[in-house]
Amino acid sequence: MDPVSIALAIPSVIAHAKAAYDFVQKFRKAGESGAKLMTEIEGLSKTLTALHGHIDKIKTAADAPLIDLAELDRSVRACNEILEAVIAKFNRGQMSKFWKRLTWTLQGEKEVMELQQALAKQQGYFVLVLQIDTSSKVIDVREEQERIKAKEVLKEEREALEARRNV
């Protein structure tokens, strides 16, 4: 999987997250589980936005050797499917209010908590990808600093040696 495809897929997942958030927000019977789900979707949206910023800078798999792009693609797709399930759960246009209330009473809390946990798992993976990417960049910067420092030390030693020869 190439990073460009993943970068192109993430905005649609973010759009699904916004739609899911809007549906959950409008559903009055959601209760505490709905509030947790909204918080999870909001956090996921922010994480996906940050992930999109990182992935958008990667042109080839070689640019991010520590990131498994195929696994990241699967996670983005899985996240999208979960958000579609949230939208389907809260889409008021699909059922009458009576059936929505009845469905919520019978299975809603458990199902919403499962959706929330699934989103939390995906968000955790995305955060891990961001941390790995950031850590690899920090390591690259440190290695570059050490190379520069080694060059400076070598230059100083050469200058000192040259000064001794000229004395």
Image (tube, grey):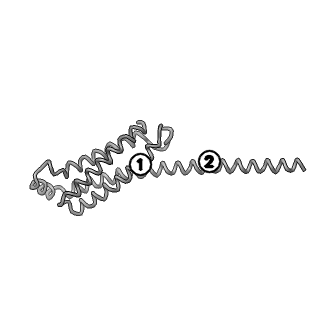
Q: Quadrant of the N terminus?
A: top left
CB within 8 Å, label 2 to label 1 = no
Q: Using a 10 Å C-alpha cutoff, classify the residue at mark 2 as few (fewer than 14 neighbours), some (14 to 19) or many (20 or more).
A: few
Question: Eyeballing the image, is 116 above or below 12?
Answer: below
Q: Work out whether mark 2 precedes mark 1 in sequence or the reverse, and give the earlier one.
A: 1
The residue closer to the viewer here, 2 or 23, is: 23
- How far across and how far down the image is residue 114, in percent? 26, 54
Q: Quadrant of residue 56?
A: top left
Q: Position of residue 13 (x, y in %)?
A: 32, 46
Of residues 11 and 3, which is closer to you in this image? 11
Q: Nearer the viewer, residue 59 or 128?
A: 59
Task: Using residue 151 as the reference point, say whether residue 94 is left or right of it.
Answer: left
Query: Would you name the residue on which mark 1 appears?
Result: 51
* Amino acid under disc 1: Leu
Q: Is residue 166 left or right of residue 138?
A: right
On the image, numbered disc 2 is attached to which residue? 144
Q: Relative to 148, say whether 6 is above or below.
A: above
